[in-house]
Image (cartoon, rainbow, N blue to C red):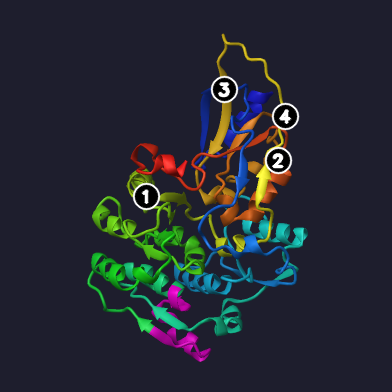
């Protein structure tokens, strides 16, 4: 029966990019991190850690971005990052691969049930822009012919409270009294030139504890745009460089970051994930991975949920030294799983039938405390949480300050 339950989990979600890893351990199906204590400890400025109830009267405005194009998402997410900097006020609906209601809808309901928000209501894109225009100092227009200017626009938006706009939106923004402050069209010849200019003129003023890896090339950007709000809320610099060709220039950004700073996002292709982690680790920085299924983290990070969690499993096992014991662990090392219910596996009726360990690095308590609380509240006696890298993914053999980090 246990074997059949695991097979159902695997077959139902076989199309997901998930590693259901078998670890040979000396514990009979149980997570070796039973006593893990999860605490918030990052250097990011998520004010919910200091506020317990000030958001309970908020009626959240919700913009439905499902099925919209990249340009629309970028506009709304840039607004969201500015608006949510102090409180969770603006939320977006986002696609899930299979489940209905979507994950983004389910989190809203959960937050309402917990009393962390009072209510929510759907608003149109332009109604949201009009309502929150007093939060905006103007617009920064990127060059559609040079995607790297999107990265520069996101960095500038975080620093100056600009909304990030495609040229097609200029007229509509002007009608609302939002004028163009910076127009990046025609300013640069190529991506490297734009990133070098940003390194000297914009990056010095950005948050040195967070860097946003945002590949903006055509065909990829729409699958990496979901974290724009979080980057802008935290005034992070955005880069769209490729580790395959631009490692030296990436290093110039990395060497100026704070020790143990976070690089959040995901490269343009999965084949570059390991090289990115290796390069980031060599500079003593940490990777937090997230791609298409990671919206609303400027909102999630402000939810006034609990900040300390202790697993309460109690068990005694008599080990047979002549046997090999196997533990099951679910891990994708990214915020996608947090947002999307571990790629929807958490919602499976088979969950709880056998012991499984679920990835949950403590850094998630800073980035999405309400989501973490949900997982602790809904775990079964057979659900265990383990930490892979604590505050972000590293490659230990390349990490120069490993003992200090530990």
Ranked by sequence position, the earlier of labels 1 and 2 is: 1
Q: Write down the region rendered in magenta.
A: 159-181
What is the x, y in percent for residue 143?
Answer: 33, 75
Please say whether residue 146 is visible from this viewpoint: no
Residue at the disc numbered 1: 269
What is the x, y in percent for residue 186?
Answer: 27, 79
Residue at the disc numbered 3: 326
- Determine whether label 4 and label 3 are within 8 Å by CB: no
Q: Residue at x 56, y 60 (%)?
A: 297
Per the model, the C-alpha gap separating discs 2 and 3 is: 21 Å
Q: Please tell me how crowded label 3 is: few (under 14), some (14-19), or many (20+) other residues with Cα within 10 Å.
A: some
Q: Nearer the viewer, mark 4 or mark 2?
A: 4
Q: Is residue 169 highlighted in magenta?
A: yes
Per the model, the C-alpha gap separating discs 1 and 2 is: 33 Å
Per the model, the C-alpha gap separating discs 1 and 4 is: 42 Å
Is 48 situated left or right of 207 in this image? right
Per the model, the C-alpha gap separating discs 1 and 3 is: 32 Å
């Amino acid at each position: 029966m246990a074997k059949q339950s695991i097979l159902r989990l695997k077959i139902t979600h076989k199309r997901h990019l998930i590693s259901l890893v078998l670890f040979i351990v000396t514990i009979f199906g149980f997570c070796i991190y039973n006593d893990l204590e999860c605490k918030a400890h990052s250097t990011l400025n998520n004010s919910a850690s200091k506020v317990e109830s000030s958001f309970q009267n908020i009626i959240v405005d919700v913009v439905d971005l499902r099925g919209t194009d990249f340009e629309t998402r970028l506009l709304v997410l840039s607004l969201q990052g500015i608006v949510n900097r102090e409180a969770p006020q603006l939320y977006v609906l986002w696609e899930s691969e299979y489940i209905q209601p979507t994950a983004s809808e389910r989190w809203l309901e959960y937050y309402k049930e917990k009393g962390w928000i009072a209510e929510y209501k759907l608003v149109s894109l332009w109604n949201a822009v009009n309502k929150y225009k007093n939060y905006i100092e103007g617009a920064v227009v990127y060059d559609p012919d040079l995607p790297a200017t999107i990265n520069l626009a996101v960095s500038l938006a975080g620093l100056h409270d600009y909304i990030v706009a495609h040229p097609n939106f200029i007229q509509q923004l002007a009608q609302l009294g939002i004028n163009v402050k910076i127009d990046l069209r025609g300013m640069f010849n190529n991506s490297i030139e734009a990133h070098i200019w940003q390194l000297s003129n914009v990056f010095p003023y950005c948050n040195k504890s967070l860097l946003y890896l945002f590949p903006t090339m055509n065909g990829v950007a729409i699958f990496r745009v979901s974290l724009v709000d979080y980057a802008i809320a935290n005034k992070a610099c955005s880069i769209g460089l490729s580790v395959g060709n631009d490692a030296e220039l990436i290093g110039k950004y990395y060497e100026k970051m704070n020790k143990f700073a976070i690089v959040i996002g995901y490269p343009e292709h999965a084949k570059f994930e390991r090289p990115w982690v290796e390069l980031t680790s060599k500079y003593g920085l940490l990777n937090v991975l997230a791609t298409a299924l990671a919206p609303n983290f400027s909102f999630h990070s402000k939810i006034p949920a609990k900040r300390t969690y202790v697993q309460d499993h109690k068990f005694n096992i008599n080990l047979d030294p002549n046997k090999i014991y196997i533990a099951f662990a679910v891990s994708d090392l990214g915020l996608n799983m947090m947002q999307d219910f571990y790629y929807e596996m958490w919602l499976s009726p088979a969950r709880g039938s056998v012991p499984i360990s679920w990835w949950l690095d403590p850094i998630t308590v800073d980035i999405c405390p309400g989501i973490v609380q949900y997982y602790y509240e809904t775990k079964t006696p057979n659900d265990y949480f383990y930490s892979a890298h604590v505050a972000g993914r590293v490659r230990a053999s390349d990490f120069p300050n490993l003992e200090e980090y530990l």
